C-alpha cells in the first residue's frame, strides 16, 4: 500500500480518501490519497515558510501557495492505464509509494514529497501530486515526465523535467535564483513588476520570448542569438535560467502575473 510519514516533533494529521476505479484487467485504475500536516516552525521571520522539495517518477506536480490555508495539504493520485499487464498492475498497486517528510535539521525546514514506483519502465502509470501550502521559502521539483505548475511561490525556484511543460506564476517579485529546465516542452515564467535577475533563456530548437515587459522595469544588456537571449532585469544579479530542448520559453513581466496568459508562438 502507498504510505506517508512525517519526521517531526509537531503533530501531523493524515487524512485518506482512497478509491479504486475498476482495478481489473482492461480497465483504467485510480487510487487517491490526501495527507495533511502542520507547517514547521520558522525561526527567521524574514522567511515566508519552509522549502518544498518534490520528486516524482512520472506525472503532474502542482504546487499552489494560498495564505488563507493553515495546513500543508498533499493530494496524490495513482493512475494506471487499462493496457498495463496484470502482473505489473498488481505490483504497482502493492508497492507504489508516496512519502511526506519534514526535515527540521536545517536553518530552513524542508518538506519533502517523494513518489516512487517498482515498475519505472512501465509507461502506463503515473502519480499526479497537488500540494497546497500557506507559504514557502523556496521550491524544488524534479519529474521524469509530466507537467510542473507552480503558483504563488517565492524564494529560490528549481523545476526540472525530462519531458513536458513548466509553468510558474508568482505575484512576489523574484530576487532569488530561478532554474527551469525541460528536455522538450514549453516553459512559461510569469513574474511581477520589480523582479530582478540575470535572464538567460535558451529554447534549443524552439523559440525564446520576453513578452509584456512593463515600462516601469529596466532591461539592460539585451542580446539575442538564434533561440537564446540574455539580459539584465532591474540590475539584478540573481540567475534566472530557462532551458528547453524544443518549445517556447517565455518570460512575462505582468501587472497580474498569477493570471494565466497564452504563450504566443
Image: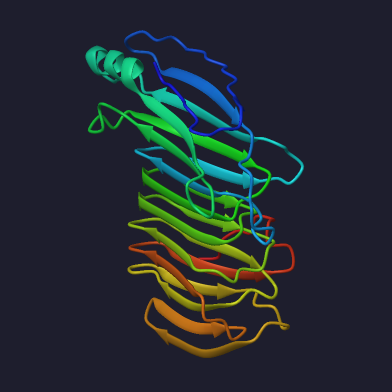
Q: Is residue 115 left or right of residue 169?
A: left
Q: Position of residue 107 (x, y in %)?
A: 53, 55
Check the image and report above or below for 223 versus 33.
below
Looking at the image, which is closer to me, 28 or 134? Answer: 134
Q: Position of residue 43 (x, y in %)?
A: 64, 53
Q: Position of residue 110 (x, y in %)?
A: 50, 46
Looking at the image, which is closer to me, 20 or 137? Answer: 137
Q: Quadrant of the N terminus?
A: top left
Check the image and report above or below for 72 versus 239.
above
Check the image and report above or below for 7 versus 88.
below
At x 62%, y 45%, the residue is 64
Q: Position of residue 243 (x, y in %)?
A: 39, 66
Residue furthest to the right: 68
Looking at the image, which is closer to me, 18 or 54? Answer: 54
Total count of labels: 0
Color style of the picture? rainbow
Looking at the image, which is closer to me, 164 or 61? Answer: 61
Q: Quadrant of residue 11?
A: top right
Residue furthest to the bottom: 221
Q: Quadrant of residue 29?
A: top left
At x 51%, y 76%, the residue is 238
Q: Quadrant of residue 182?
A: bottom left
At x 43%, y 21%, the residue is 3
At x 69%, y 58%, the residue is 45
Amino acid at each position: 500500500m502507498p504510505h506517508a510519514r512525517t519526521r517531526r516533533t509537531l503533530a501531523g494529521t493524515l487524512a485518506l480518501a482512497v478509491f479504486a476505479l475498476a482495478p481489473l484487467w482492461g480497465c483504467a485504475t485510480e487510487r487517491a490519497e490526501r495527507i495533511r500536516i502542520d507547517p514547521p516552525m520558522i525561526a527567521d521571520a524574514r522567511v515566508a515558510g519552509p522549502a518544498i522539495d518534490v520528486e516524482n517518477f512520472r506525472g503532474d506536480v502542482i504546487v499552489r501557495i494560498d495564505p488563507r490555508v493553515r495546513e500543508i495539504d498533499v493530494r496524490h493520485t495513482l493512475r494506471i492505464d487499462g493496457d498495463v499487464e496484470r502482473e505489473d498492475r498488481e505490483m504497482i498497486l502493492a508497492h507504489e509509494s508516496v512519502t511526506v517528510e519534514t526535515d527540521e535539521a536545517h536553518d530552513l525546514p524542508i518538506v519533502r514529497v517523494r513518489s516512487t514506483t517498482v515498475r519505472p519502465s512501465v509507461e502506463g502509470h503515473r502519480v499526479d501530486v497537488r500540494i497546497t501550502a500557506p507559504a514557502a521559502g523556496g521550491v524544488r521539483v524534479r519529474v521524469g515526465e509530466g507537467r510542473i505548475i507552480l503558483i504563488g511561490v517565492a524564494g529560490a525556484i528549481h523545476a526540472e523535467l525530462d519531458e513536458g511543460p513548466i509553468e510558474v506564476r508568482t505575484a512576489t517579485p523574484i530576487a532569488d535564483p530561478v532554474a527551469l529546465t525541460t528536455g522538450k516542452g514549453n516553459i512559461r515564467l510569469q513574474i511581477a513588476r520589480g523582479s530582478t535577475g540575470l535572464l538567460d533563456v535558451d529554447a534549443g530548437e524552439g523559440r525564446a520570448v520576453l513578452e509584456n515587459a512593463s515600462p516601469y522595469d529596466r532591461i539592460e544588456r539585451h542580446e539575442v542569438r538564434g533561440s537564446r537571449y540574455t539580459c539584465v532585469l532591474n540590475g539584478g544579479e540573481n540567475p534566472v535560467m530557462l532551458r528547453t530542448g524544443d518549445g517556447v520559453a517565455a518570460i512575462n513581466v505582468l501587472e497580474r502575473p498569477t493570471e494565466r496568459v497564452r504563450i504566443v508562438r
